[in-house]
Amino acid sequence: MGLTKLERRIRIQKRIRKIVTGTADRPRLSVYRSNKEIYAQVIDDTTGKTLVAASSRDKAIKADAADKIAIASSVGKLLAEVASKAGVSNVTFDRGGYLYHGRVKALADGAREGGLKF
């Protein structure tokens, strides 16, 4: 019997997390995508702390009610802005088992435009 979509994504996510880890110098930018929303966190895995977070549920993003790809891009820009205030400029990108396509790619491009380097 084959894997469900969720089981397949979790298997891919575990394979990625073996390689991608966040440190204090270079934290991990983690992406979670649901059907309606998109969430991003900058995480220091050595201490297990979330340094910065942004999502499409934030009030600054909700005013921008365009398509989901445009919202993901603005979440990436907001995350980069908040991260720069927190002193984070370099991150490693964790796509969370999702394909680097569509909303995940838009969020990454938005974060790059905002000033994050990865």
Image (cartoon, helix red, strand yellow):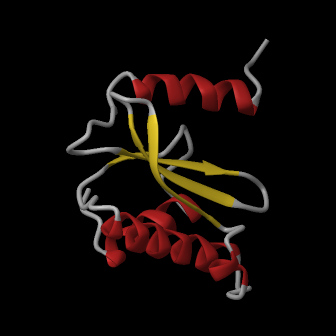
Total count of labels:
0
Residue 111 is at least partly visible in this image: yes
Depth check: 92 or 53 in front? 53
**Point 78% across, 62% down: residue:** 36
Between 80 and 103, the one lying in front of the other is 80
Give the residue displayed 61% in from the left and 56% down from the top: 39
Residue 109 appears in view: no
Q: Is residue 52 left or right of residue 60?
A: left
| Lateral position of residue 74 relative to residue 25, left or right | right
- Residue 94 at x, y percent in the picture: 43, 43
Position in image of residue 85 (x %, y %) = 34, 70
Residue that extends furthest to the left in the rendered view of this protein: 25
**Which residue is found at the position 23% from the left and 56% from the top?**
90
- Is residue 104 shown left or right of residue 66? left
Q: Position of residue 16 (x, y in %)?
A: 42, 30
Which residue is at 28% across, 73% downward?
A: 115
Q: Is residue 20 above or below residue 81?
A: above
Q: Is residue 38 above or below residue 25?
A: below
Rendered position, 8 above or below 78? above
- In the picture, measured across the screen, residue 61 lies left or right of residue 81, that is right
| Observer-nearest of 2 and 84 | 84
- The location of residue 118, given as percent across then percent down, is 26, 56
Seen in the picture, residue 37 relative to 112 is either above or below; the reply is: above
Quadrant of the snapshot with the N terminus: top right
